[in-house]
Image (spheres, rainbow, N blue to C red):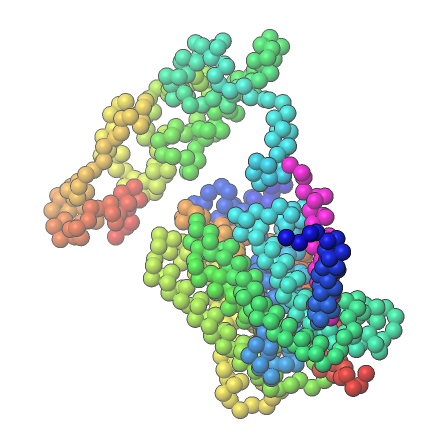
């Protein structure tokens, strides 16, 4: 093995740099200038990035890690529904059995964190007017059919909601008289259709409990072509002025409502 | 709140059928129409320039440098509509410094930067280097300094160096074509990949965008050539014009075929959205799609160019036909962008209603800003033409110096 000779090492390092310089000089002038420019741009960008990107960025994910601490440091406004049951267990029990079992207490009563800290000093409000309930129960066509909805302008105007409804266990004080109370979209279509004077109960049988617990007790629906044929078959008697077809030959592979929407049947 | 209601009230009156509450007002307005239009012009102008270098189309030589500068002028303006639309332009650097690789929109920043730095500026630099050096030798004062800086203080005009320039231009063009495809293909991709929107969601979208970009880019260079040449008191090169018009014609044929293919595909597929889309096309978009985009922007110029090619006619009449056709193509392609961006937001996701779009005149999203952004590239182009004259007579020969 050769001994380490500092002179040889130095000269070989010197040789390396000399060769590097020679190679650099052989590059076309354009490449040299662009390389210098590129080096300056890369250096500037790396420096800017080091200065501008927060040091803790990307520690947990694509965000600044200290942002989590800042969010944690914000004062807590909401207490969550569990703590309410500790004092208001009677209300909680009533609510747990009713339709509002999945509506948190603070949805109506507002943020409760301060109230749980000092029960006497901070009192929560309950909506006593008509401003709160319609936020969920005002009629909107995009709400699911069967969800209790009212048109507040015509639904007992000026009377507060809690005058008739117990918010913790909401039930209609009297069962809705008309299907349209809940099925407003269908009722509106039907009202302008040829079926306007056909009662809902002509085609659907609704058990009484349906009005109190609509999803557990579903109304019936016609189950075959024969049902519509009761009026629309050309053999049906005493039905003058009603469009009639020959049930046996009219599109026999389909049931009626695949082509005709019964709540707004087209005129033929 | 009051202001919001005043804004929404007239819109609500024009809503047809049933739409969801958050669909009344469009989120992407006129600025987002301007953005793909401008980006398309960049890609189109660059691809036209590439024809000269890669396929050696000598007739187009007079428009080569002009196309490059046009692409640059429009590329510099391309991100501005987005910055104006998003707001907070001072935060935009974060897209580059903390890149989110899972976001197509965030990655586009890099496509843009690559295209600007590694393709366009590089090609222009190699293309102009010799002239910059020679110009600087003859000039004095600020102009000399500017040209020296632009040439990066380069001074080598040896034959070997010039040969290297030419090779580099070719290499950059070769990288540039897929980059230009990527640049505008991305814009189509952004719309095509939104699967919840049946008007946008189509794999053909990037390709349709690309070919309409080529169409608009060629038409733009044709227009600029036809305006700039007489303004300089020069004679237009008829062979160049004829070639430009031919390429415009071919690109339009491909673009038109792709759009028709897309149309037939949609009609044949007849997904559940077909009825609302039919209502959209025959109703709210009738003027901008059927009349402006299809008839005025596509069929009329196609027919006019075909006639100019087939019939014997004086060259002045030909020039006029090319000019009007290119102008109509611009209007048509702008309409295409409008129909994609605005059209895709006019129908409800419930497929049972249509809303309406009304642009404002003032404000960041308004007509005035959009018109400013469409004029700005021409201003930049004017400055670029002054600094880097693309004309044949501006080239200095080595012997002359």
Where is A133 relative to B131, above or below?
above
Q: Nearer the viewer, residue B26 or A268?
A: B26
Q: Is residue B305 visible?
A: yes
Does residue B289 appear left or right of residue A175 in this picture?
right
Residue at the location (67% across, 42% down)? Answer: A53
Q: Residue at x 71, y 65 (%)?
A: A19
Relative horizontal placement of residue A212, taking residue A14 as reference (left or right):
left
Image coords of residue A86 (percent x, y): 48, 10
Q: Above or below — where is B368 with respect to A164?
A: below
Lateral position of residue B307 relative to residue B85, left or right = left
- Position of residue B314 measured from the top left corner of the image (x, y, whole percent): 59, 90
Rendered residue at 72%/59% (across/down): A12
Would residue A128 be counted in the magenta stretch? Answer: no
Residue A35 is a magenta residue: yes
| Towards the viewer: A59 or B253 | A59
Q: Where does the magenta region start and end?
A: A29-56
Q: Nearer the viewer, residue B183 or B89?
A: B183
């Amino acid at each position: 093995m050769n001994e380490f000779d500092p002179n040889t090492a130095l000269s070989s390092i010197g040789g390396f740099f000399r060769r590097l310089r020679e190679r650099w000089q052989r590059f076309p002038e354009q490449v040299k200038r662009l390389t210098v420019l590129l080096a300056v741009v890369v250096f500037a960008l790396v420096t800017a990035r080091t200065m501008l990107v927060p040091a803790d960025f990307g520690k947990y994910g694509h965000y600044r890690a200290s942002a989590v601490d800042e969010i944690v440091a914000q004062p807590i406004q909401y207490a969550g529904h569990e703590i309410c049951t500790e004092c208001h267990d009677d209300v909680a029990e009533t609510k747990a059995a009713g339709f509002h079992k999945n509506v948190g207490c603070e949805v109506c009563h507002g943020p409760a964190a301060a109230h749980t800290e000092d029960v006497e000093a901070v009192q929560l409000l309950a909506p006593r007017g008509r401003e709160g309930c319609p936020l969920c129960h005002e009629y909107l066509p995009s709400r699911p059919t069967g969800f209790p909805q009212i048109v507040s302008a015509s639904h007992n105007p000026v009377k507060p909601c809690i005058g008739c409804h117990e918010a913790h266990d909401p039930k209609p004080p009297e069962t809705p008289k008309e299907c349209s109370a809940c099925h407003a979209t269908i009722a509106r279509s039907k009202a302008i259709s040829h079926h306007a004077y056909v009662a809902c109960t002509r085609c659907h049988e609704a058990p009484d409990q349906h009005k109190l617990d609509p999803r557990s007790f579903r109304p019936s629906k016609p189950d075959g072509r024969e049902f519509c044929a009761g009026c629309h078959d050309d053999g049906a008697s005493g039905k003058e002025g009603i469009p009639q077809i020959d049930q046996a030959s009219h599109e026999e592979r389909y049931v009626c409502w695949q082509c005709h929407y019964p709540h707004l049947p087209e005129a033929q | 709140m009051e202001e919001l209601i005043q804004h929404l009230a007239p819109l609500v009156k024009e809503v047809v059928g049933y739409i969801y509450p958050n669909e009344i007002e469009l989120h992407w307005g006129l600025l987002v129409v301007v953005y793909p239009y401008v980006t398309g012009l960049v890609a189109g102008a660059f691809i036209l320039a590439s024809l000269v270098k890669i396929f050696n189309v000598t007739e187009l030589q007079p428009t080569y440098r002009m196309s490059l500068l046009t692409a640059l002028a429009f590329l510099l303006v391309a991100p501005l509509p987005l910055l104006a639309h998003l707001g907070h332009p001072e935060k935009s650097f974060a897209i580059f410094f903390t890149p989110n690789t899972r976001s197509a929109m965030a990655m586009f920043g890099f496509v843009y930067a690559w295209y600007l730095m590694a393709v366009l500026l590089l090609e222009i630099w190699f293309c102009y280097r010799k002239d910059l050096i020679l110009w600087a030798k003859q000039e004095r004062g600020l102009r000399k300094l500017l040209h020296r800086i632009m040439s990066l203080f380069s001074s080598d005009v040896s034959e070997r160096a010039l040969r290297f320039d030419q090779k580099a231009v070719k290499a950059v063009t070769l990288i540039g074509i897929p980059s230009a495809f990527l640049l505008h293909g991305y814009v189509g991709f952004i719309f095509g990949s939104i699967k919840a929107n049946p008007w946008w969601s189509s794999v053909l979208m990037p390709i349709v965008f690309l070919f309409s970009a080529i169409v608009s880019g060629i038409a733009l260079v044709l227009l600029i050539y036809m305006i700039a040449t007489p303004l300089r008191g020069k004679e237009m090169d008829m062979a160049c014009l004829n070639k430009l018009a031919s390429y415009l014609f071919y690109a339009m044929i491909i673009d038109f075929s792709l759009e028709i293919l897309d149309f037939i595909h949609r009609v044949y597929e007849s997904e559940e959205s077909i009825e609302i889309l039919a209502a959209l096309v025959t109703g709210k978009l009738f003027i901008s799609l059927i009349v402006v985009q299809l008839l005025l922007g596509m069929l009329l110029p196609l027919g006019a160019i075909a006639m100019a090619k087939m019939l014997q006619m004086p060259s002045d009449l030909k020039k006029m036909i090319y000019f009007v056709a290119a102008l109509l193509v611009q209007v048509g392609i702008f309409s295409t962008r409008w129909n994609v961006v605005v059209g895709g937001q006019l129908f409800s996701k419930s497929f049972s209603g249509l809303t309406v779009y009304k642009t404002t005149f003032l404000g960041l999203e308004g007509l005035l800003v959009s018109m400013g952004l469409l004029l700005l590239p021409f201003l930049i182009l004017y400055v670029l033409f002054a600094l880097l004259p693309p004309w044949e007579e501006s080239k200095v020969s080595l012997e002359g110096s």
